[in-house]
Amino acid sequence: MDSLKERLEKEKNRKPNFWEKNLAKVFSYLGMFLLLIGLGIASYDYYFIRKSIQTIGEVIRLDGGGGKSGYAPVIEYFDENKESHLFYSVIFSRPPAFAVGEKVNVYYQSENPEEASLGYSWLAILVLAGIGLVFLFFGILFQKVLFV
């Protein structure tokens, strides 16, 4: 049986595997990637809303509800020319985030009124940027701890 001193000497001369060498970099790069995606969504939403016209729409029905998918609102809104348009939300929730007949703010592009949004995608922005910051923090921390 090897003594502790012999085992420590063997461990010191052992070549580190991929994850031991690159874990900090992987965490840092993944964190930066997720943070950039979150910031990209935020900037897209910001410029979309900045170029958009705001109007009031009405929830005319809730799509979905089958199984565990939740409900997504279908919203009718009118553009500057009093033409009716429908916005089909891709965000499903259970319980429904909106009630039929509820009035909501809708942002649409004047040159293409069919392109609309309900505003900022806060959930996606916060989740991606938050997870990105956590990964980036631990990536930097691992670099400091592993390379001391």
Image: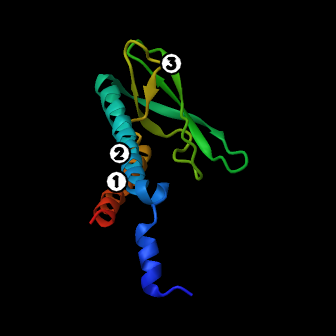
Q: Position of residue 105 (x, y in %)?
A: 40, 34
Q: Amino acid at mark 3?
A: Ser
Q: In terms of sequence position, does the residue under pointer 1 or pointer 3 come before the other?
A: 3
Q: Residue furthest right?
A: 67
Q: Based on the displayed image, in which of its 4 quarters is residue 53 positioned?
A: top left
Viewer-proximal residue among 48 and 77: 48
Mark 1 sits on what residue? 136
Q: Is residue 5 placed above or below 126 in the rendered structure? A: below
Precedes in sequence: disc 3 or disc 2: 2
Seen from the viewer's position, the closer of residues 148 and 95 is 148
Q: From where the camera sits, is residue 120 visible?
A: no
Q: Which residue is pictured at 52% across the width and 44% down the height?
A: 98
Q: Which mark is residue 84?
A: 3
User: Could you say whether the residue bearing mark 2 is in a helix, strand or loop?
Assistant: helix
Instruction: List x then y, in percent, for residue 129.
Output: 37, 48
Q: Which mark is residue 32?
A: 2
Q: Report the disc number at residue 13.
A: none
The amino acid on which the numbered mark 1 sits, given as a three-letter code, is Leu
**Residue 14 to residue 92: above or below:** below
